[in-house]
Image (cartoon, rainbow, N blue to C red):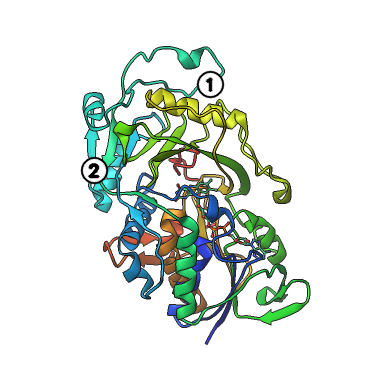
């Protein structure tokens, strides 16, 4: 039986632990936190959508949706509490960087049901929405922001998709299912060293003293992923760079006529909006060029307090799109950190260090994919440890719930930069 250490018990790490345990690995998950899902997963908006810029990413999201939809079946165990999928649908507003025609072609190929709405249809289906075209996004402090729209935009709508109500509970569910299949979890335990024999990982040091010997190590450390790569001496052959980025998501009361509204992705104004079961709306950003990006150099020094500036930028944009929105006086919401890859597409791959694997660069958009990331990583690791040359002959993953084939070369550390990327959280 192969021994594996997985670093990070977020939603991604816990999902991989479940599938490696199912695949017969002797798996130990190590996390410096006190429980599963307490890292960046805990602040996730947990939006489930299918709008991505490549076939493999759309297929991955569509396959994963079916796992959320059949969550108890996916986990395979009885638990006292399960996270829930709210299948409210997704409206993606038109914007030059996210072509509706191209998205429609990808949806057609993958099998995602959708409708294309004209501005008039959008106004009918989403009462209370302002269909004005404001592209490109402007600073909310500028006069241009308040200029009248010169034309109207439509949207592409998927009746399926929505959100998961409790992202941390999702990670806990996966961790409990992994434990039921034999995985062990060590919490309050920091990986301080990765030990190698030549170019192969052979062990991991925990809390500066205890050493566990292993056959494979998986880095699922979220925003800390680059630090873990450095411990392994991996990363020199990556064509895709990684960097953490600070984010804020704000919460406001929902206009009553939009309840229990679909998700609204709105690159035209630079935001996304997500309803909640209790009648409020979460508002996040889509990295509009006019706003400064908050790259993080020191993860221990991130300001975890929401700022008035971000609150006003995001909520004022939301109120432009939904004029009935009540803007509260003070910010409510969360601060979180993305592990951003250069093209906003994750890296699910081996590395140049034998036995050292990565599930990183999740770029603020991979919560939704976690259940299938677990499966594809278990498949990838099993294939490579059996001698497959994935770098030259990419492993193909067969999505059992949709029948789609996913080329894992699309998530290679050595892939060409995804030039179709929106260069934002939309991927
Ligand atoms: C504000 C925000 C909103 C988001 N919204 C969405 C969304 O709407 N839809 C979507 O699909 N995705 C979304 N995402 C992205 C998604 O939540 C993340 O991609 C996902 O949660 C990452 O999970 P992870 O397991 O990789 O990382 P994490 O949850 O960060 O887990 C990494 C773990 O590694 C542990 N760790 C780090 N270093 C060490 C060490 N040395 N030793 C031991 N343990 C270590 C940490 O304690 C942590 O628990 C959002 C993210 C954020 C921050």
Residue 224 position within the rendered picture, expressed as x and y whole percent measured from the top left: 65, 56
Residue lying furthest bottom? 1
Whether residue 240 sits left or right of residue 151 in the image: it is right
Q: Dot 2, how many residues are within 10 Å of its Cα: few (below 14), some (14-19), or many (20+)?
A: some
Whether residue 281 sits left or right of residue 197 in the image: it is left
Q: Nearer the viewer, residue 195 or 182?
A: 182
Q: Which residue corresponds to the image point at 50% horizontal and 38% vertical from the top-left?
A: 423
Instruction: Confirm if mark 1 falls within 8 A of ligand 1.
Output: no
Position of residue 354 relative to residue 330, above or below, is below
Residue lying furthest right? 209
Q: Which residue corresponds to the image point at 54% horizontal and 22% vertical from the top-left?
A: 139
Residue 279 position within the rendered picture, expressed as x and y whole percent measured from the top left: 38, 41
Position of residue 54 relative to residue 289, above or below, is below
**Ligand 1, image quadrant it occupies:** bottom right
Q: Which residue corresponds to the image point at 43% horizontal and 27% vertical from the top-left?
A: 326
Q: Which residue corresponds to the image point at 41% horizontal and 39% vertical from the top-left?
A: 280
Mark 2, secondary structure of its residue: loop
Whether residue 179 sits left or right of residue 156 in the image: it is right
Mark 1, secondary structure of its residue: loop
| Quarter of the figure with residue 335 | top right
Instruction: Confirm if mark 2 falls within 8 A of ligand 1.
Output: no
Q: Distance between the residues labelled 1 and 2?
A: 32 Å
Residue 41 position within the rendered picture, expressed as x and y whole percent measured from the top left: 53, 55
Q: Earlier in the sequence, mark 1 or mark 2?
A: 2
Residue where numbered disc 2 is placed: 114
Between marks 1 and 2 in the image, the one whose residue lies nearer the viewer: 1
Residue 260 position within the rendered picture, expressed as x and y whole percent measured from the top left: 31, 41
Res 33 visible: yes
Marker disc for residue 140: 1
Whether residue 375 sits left or right of residue 230 in the image: it is left
Q: Dot 1, how many residues are within 10 Å of its Cα: few (below 14), some (14-19), or many (20+)?
A: some
């Amino acid at each position: 039986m192969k021994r594996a250490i997985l670093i990070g018990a977020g939603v991604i790490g816990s999902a991989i632990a479940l599938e490696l345990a199912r695949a017969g690995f002797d798996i130990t998950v190590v996390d410096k936190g006190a429980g599963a899902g307490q890292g960046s997963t805990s602040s996730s908006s947990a939006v489930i959508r299918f709008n991505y810029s490549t076939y493999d990413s759309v297929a991955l999201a569509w396959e994963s949706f079916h796992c959320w939809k059949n969550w108890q079946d996916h986990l395979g165990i009885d638990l006292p509490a399960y996270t829930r999928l709210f299948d409210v649908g997704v409206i993606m507003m038109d914007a030059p960087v996210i072509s509706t025609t191209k998205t429609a072609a990808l949806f057609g190929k993958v099998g995602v049901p959708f409708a294309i709405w004209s501005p008039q249809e959008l106004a009918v289906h989403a009462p209370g929405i302002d269909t004005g075209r404001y592209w490109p996004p402007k600073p909310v402090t500028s006069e241009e922001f308040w200029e009248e729209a010169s034309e109207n935009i439509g949207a592409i709508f998927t009746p399926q998709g929505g959100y998961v109500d409790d992202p941390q509970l999702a990670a806990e569910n996966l961790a409990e299912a992994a434990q039921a299949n034999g995985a062990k979890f060590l919490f309050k335990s920091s990986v301080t060293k990765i030990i190698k024999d030549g170019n192969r990982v052979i062990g991991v040091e925990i809390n500066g003293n205890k050493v566990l010997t292993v056959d494979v190590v998986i880095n699922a450390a979220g925003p800390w992923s680059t630090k873990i790569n450095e411990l392994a001496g991996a990363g020199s052959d990556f064509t895709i760079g990684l960097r953490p980025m600070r984010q804020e998501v704000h919460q406001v009361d929902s206009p009553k006529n939009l309840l229990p509204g679909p998700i609204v992705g709105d690159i035209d104004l630079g935001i996304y909006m997500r309803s909640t079961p209790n009648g409020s709306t979460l508002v996040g950003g889509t990295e509009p060029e006019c706003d400064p990006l908050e790259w993080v150099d020191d993860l221990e020094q991130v300001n975890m307090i929401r700022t008035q500036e971000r609150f006003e930028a995001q909520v004022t944009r939301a109120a432009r799109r939904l004029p009935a929105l009540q803007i509260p006086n003070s910010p409510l919401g969360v601060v979180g950190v993305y592990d951003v890859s250069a093209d906003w597409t994750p890296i699910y791959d081996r590395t140049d260090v034998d036995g050292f694997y990565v599930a990183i660069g999740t770029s603020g958009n991979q919560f939704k994919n976690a259940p299938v990331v677990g499966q594809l990583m278990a498949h990838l690791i099993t294939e490579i440890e059996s001698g497959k040359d994935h770098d030259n002959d990419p492993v193909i993953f067969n999505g059992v719930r949709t029948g789609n084939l996913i080329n894992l070369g699309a998530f290679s550390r050595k892939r060409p930069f995804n030039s179709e990327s929106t260069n934002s959280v939309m991927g």
